[in-house]
Amino acid sequence: MAWIKRNLLFVVGLAVAVALLGVGVFYLLGSMSQADSASTELETMNQKLDELVNHDPFPSNENVEKIRAQQKRVADFKQQAKVKFSEETKPESLDNASFKTVLEQTIGSLEHEAERSGVRLPDKYDFTFSEQRKKLQLAQNALSPLVTELRDLGDVCHILFEAKIHSLVSLKRPGVGSNEAPGSTDLLSKKVTTNTVAGVVIYPYEVSFQCFSSELGAVLTGLIAAPQNYVIKTVNVERGTALETPTPVAAPAAVNQGFGGMDPALARRYGLSGGRYGAPAQQPVPVAQPTVRVGETVLDEKPLKITLGLEVVKLMPSAPAPASNAPRPNPNR
């Protein structure tokens, strides 16, 4: 202890030196770790640079200009394609009373059109809107989507009726809101989707009907030529059921008896089939023809049951142009 007291300054300096040495070692180790990280990052960047340099095509100014030209071409094609797509329109100031009016008018119009075209509908069919016809009050935010789906189904039914299909089996649409849970015979498990990149809204539907191959071709042609944008996702073909039509019963052929009930060939042999002694020729007995009611379809074979999975693609409503903040010129100047 006496030696420490005599060499206090030396001991303090030695302690400070040891502390500084520890700090230096810690700093050195930290710097080495940072240096290793920087070396690894530098090596990674060098590898990326080598990939870019050796990449085909090389990112030169000429190739960059070609890419920009292709981007402009894609943008122009997108603008031209938008002309083929209809924009989604939402009805304004729609309440329960007006929705009920539109619903009943649309269903009545479809029923009359089906009757005129000779298309059979399911008994007391509501075109997937049975719940809406029963309820007196509906959620306000559900009225606009319901009207959109009602219009889409009406357009699809119009194409089916124009093609003179045999019968409409069923329709299915996506549910609207939490009140329409999937699992019903009228609802799909799919939902309406929105593609913000393409700027479109996609409505899925399913249609089942009975027809022959010629009517199926007319339906597909109608979907292609329609102003709406339909995408056929699935086509399922099954054997349908035929109508029960009465089979005509042929009347027995009348036997032309000769003179006095003689065989016609023998009567002709002796000259008794005509002339003075000939028996008068019997008139043919008319055969009763089966009667067919107007609008009734008579089939000779079983039709096909077709189930189509459709998607109606619509453009999202365009955003209103922003108001300009620039001052307007004064006409009095």
Image (spheres, rainbow, N blue to C red):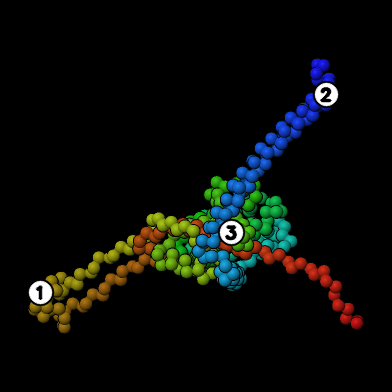
Measure how far apart labels 3 and 2 are at the Cα level.
Answer: 87 Å
Residue labelled with disc 3: 202
Image point (61%, 58%), residue name: 195
- Give the mark, 2 or 1, whose residue is nearer the N terminus: 2
Q: Is residue 285 left or right of residue 110?
A: left
Residue labelled with disc 2: 8
Q: Is residue 134 left or right of residue 17?
A: left
Q: Cβ–Cβ below 8 Å for labels 1 and 3?
A: no
Mark 2: secondary structure:
helix
Q: Callout 1 environment at 10 Å: few (<14), some (14 to 19), or many (20+)?
A: few
Mark 1: secondary structure:
helix
Image point (41%, 57%), residue name: 237
Inspect the image, locate mark 3, and give the three-letter code of the amino acid beneath it.
Ile
Q: Quadrant of residue 147?
A: bottom right
| Front in this rendered view, residue 161 or 34 | 34
Q: Which mark is residue 266?
A: 1
Inspect the image, locate mark 1, and give the three-letter code of the amino acid beneath it.
Leu
- The outermost residue toward the top is 1
Image x and y of residue 97, in percent: 71, 58
Inspect the image, locate mark 2, and give the three-letter code of the amino acid beneath it.
Leu
Image x and y of residue 10, in percent: 80, 26
| Front in this rendered view, residue 320 or 103 | 320
**On the rendered image, what quadrant is the C terminus found in?**
bottom right
